Amino acid sequence: MGIEQFAFFLVAQFLLGLFSSLFQPARTVALKSVVSVEQLGRANAILDTTFRTVRIAAPMTIGLIAAAVPLSTLFFVNAASYMLSVVFLYTLRVSLHDQATASAAKMTPGQYVRDIAEGVRELRKSRLLLLVLLFSNMGFLVWQVCYSVGFPFLAERIQQGDGSTLAMLMGFYGVGNLLGSLYMSRAYYTRYLLVILIGWTLQAGGFLLLATGGTVHWLAFLGAAVAGVGGPFIGIPTVTAIQIKAASSSTGKIFAINMLIFTFFSMLSSSLGAIWLGSWPVEQLFFISGLFLAAMSATGFFIDQRNSRQQHQSASV
């Protein structure tokens, strides 16, 4: 639109974040209503695979289009893609008709607080779901700063600011994401916390490899791919656990709480990166972050093993 004031972009970014927060809870609830319980894990994995594939292909497409049109035009192309998505999503209205006609309380601030309180009460009843939400998001305390600060600084360390190096690091991470999603689309599992912890363990291993990437460059690309594989092991089981373990009336509420926890740890990570972690040498940042994720995963494995043993004993009795 030709507006150059920076405040305009801040407002636009805020609005994008505000309205995008509506999409994920709605998708989670909608998927539960149109897919059988047995197929939820695979459906989430297929959606995740599609997302990862598009995220790899999109930069190449943008590069081709940007060579022929102004940068501002790309935002209109992006808007058109959203409108196309609206058309496809609108075709789901028949499948969602029963839920759409159900009575719903008026969304006042008081009702919002009551909904969150109801979700918290359900989490207190389901210890497994609480552990899933906690361990699936706690790792973002270091992941966010490593992704937003560590990757660019490591690329600069490798090739002294060559942008193609950062693109390669992100590309290897994206390929790892895609491989992880493809595996999850065929996997069958019921121990959601265990799969999430395996994902963070892969992230820990990848970060430790990235810590050596400043001197041994090929290890940096390998580490990015290994860390990328772990991503779908974390996100997909979390969504599936919420869809299966939460009551139908609370699925959206539990997912909203999950987003709040994610936002809290991500904001805390970004804040730490701005005032403390971001000043560390990049190798030290990845090394400490890898150790943190490894320790967190080890704690989670111990808790999961103890819960599994207790359930087995209860079933035997």
Image: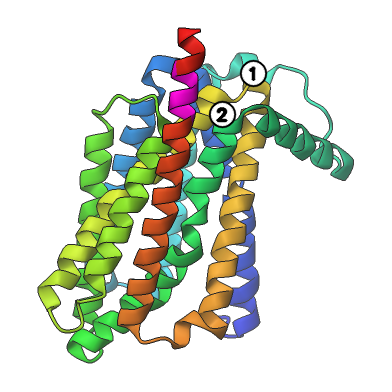
* Residue 1 seen by the camera: no
Q: Nearer the viewer, residue 146 or 110?
A: 146
Q: Position of residue 155 (x, y in %)?
A: 25, 81
The residue carrying mark 1 is 99
Q: Position of residue 143 (x, y in %)?
A: 42, 64
- In reply to whether residue 309 is colored magenta, the answer given is yes
Q: Residues within 10 Å of mark 2 (few under 14, many from 20)?
A: some
Q: Residue at x 30, y 41 (%)?
A: 50
Task: Give the color scheme: rainbow, by chain, secondary structure or one colour.
Answer: rainbow
Q: Nearer the viewer, mark 1 or mark 2?
A: 2
Q: For the stretch drawn in magenta, what is the main secondary structure?
A: helix
What's the magenta region?
307-312
Pointer 1 and pointer 2: residues touching (CB < 8 Å)?
yes
Q: Is residue 138 above or below residue 128?
A: below
- In reply to whether residue 176 is colored magenta, the answer given is no
Q: Residue at x 75, y 39 (%)?
A: 116
**Amino acid, disc 2:** Val
Q: Residue at x 28, y 81 (%)?
A: 154
The residue carrying mark 2 is 29
Q: Nearer the viewer, residue 22 or 239?
A: 239
Say which element carries label 2: helix
Q: Nearer the viewer, residue 166 or 238?
A: 238
Q: Residue at x 38, y 77 (%)?
A: 285
How far apart, in angstroms, are the residues tagged by discs 1 and 2?
A: 10 Å
Q: Position of residue 311 (x, y in %)?
A: 48, 20
